[in-house]
Amino acid sequence: MLNAARQRAESTGETLGQALSSLARATLTRGARDTIARGLLTLPKPNRLGVVAVAASTSIFSGRMFRSGDTPAAIANVPNIITVVRILLVPLFLWLLLSDAGELGLARYLAAVLFIVAIATDSLDGYLARSRNLVTDLGKILDPIADKALIGSALVGLSLLGELWWWVTIVILVREFGITVYRFIALRDRVIPAAASGKAKTMAQAIAVSLLLLPLWDLVGTWYLWLGWVVMGVALALTIYSGAEYLVAAWRHGRQR
């Protein structure tokens, strides 16, 4: 198997360890897997956990992490890591926003900058995944969750601070999470392509939240605040329209089956 692993590593660009792991998964029979599982159960619990942890980490990092190619992509590839980091930044962003308590101080500006940087990585991880053939099932699940968690936390934070009407936040959150749940439950056996209105909705939401988070109205005038509200109105309208359009498309797709 070692020679075969070396040949695989040379042809695919994988490391020797990754090649061995891939060959082991491909060649182990079900009986062999059962034998290994029983062997693990005979080990002391600390040793058993260590073996499982090493095996899990090997599986997660097995494959391409950044380079383009046709071989399987690692679960922990760079685009997925960027997405996970975006999710992990949500609590820090919300803490900065709420700790400012509407004083429009340094914490508010840091929260705004953090949001803008984090939401900008949505385009980055998507571009890297598509251009380098690093699209994974995990990434398809995490990416929309990251976007909705970031924008949703910003909307809730602004409403808690009294800077955005609660009904706007509720309507947007119900649409976003309602469509997400519907997609996972009712549409798990088929894919409805993203419409242009959905992409425009996401862009409008990101711009509107960014404008409302950056408290520049004290520097440039109240027109800036009005601009933020107008863009939020556009985002709200696109949110409702794109949600209805998605449900209609799903209904039509279901009738054609």
Image (cartoon, rainbow, N blue to C red):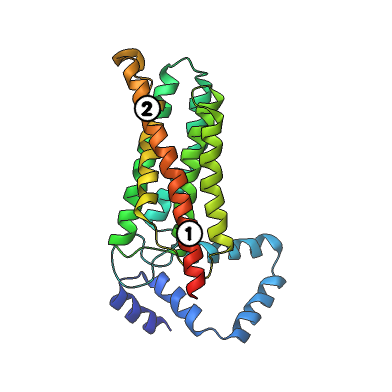
Which residue occupies 60% across, 61% down?
Answer: 50
Q: Which quadrant holds the N terminus?
A: bottom left
In this rendering, the count of numbered labels is 2
> In the image, 136: left or right of 30?
left
Cβ–Cβ under 8 Å for marks 1 and 2: no
In front of the other: label 1 or label 2? 1
Q: Amino acid at mark 2?
A: Gly
Left or right: where does residue 46 sit relative to residue 29? right
Query: Badge 2 is on which residue?
Result: 228
| Residue 113 image label | none
Question: Residue 49, position in %: x, y?
Answer: 64, 61
Which comes before the other along the chain, label 1 or label 2? 2
Examine the rendered structure and indicate whether residue 223 appears above or below residue 196.
Answer: above
- Comparing 20 with 22, the one in front is 22
Task: Determine the image quadrant of residue 214.
Answer: top left
Q: List x then y, in percent, for residue 78.
A: 37, 55
Is residue 3 positioned above or below 65 on the image? below
Residue 236 percent location from the top left of the image: 44, 38
At a point 34% along the width and 19% down the height, the residue shown is 216
Q: Amino acid at mark 1?
A: Val
Categorize mark 1 by other alpha carbons within 10 Å: few (<14), some (14-19), many (20+): few
Q: Secondary structure at mark 2?
A: helix
Neighbor class of circle 2 (other Cα within 10 Å; few <14, some 14-19, many 20+) is many
- Residue 97 relative to residue 15: left or right: right
Residue assigned mark 1? 248
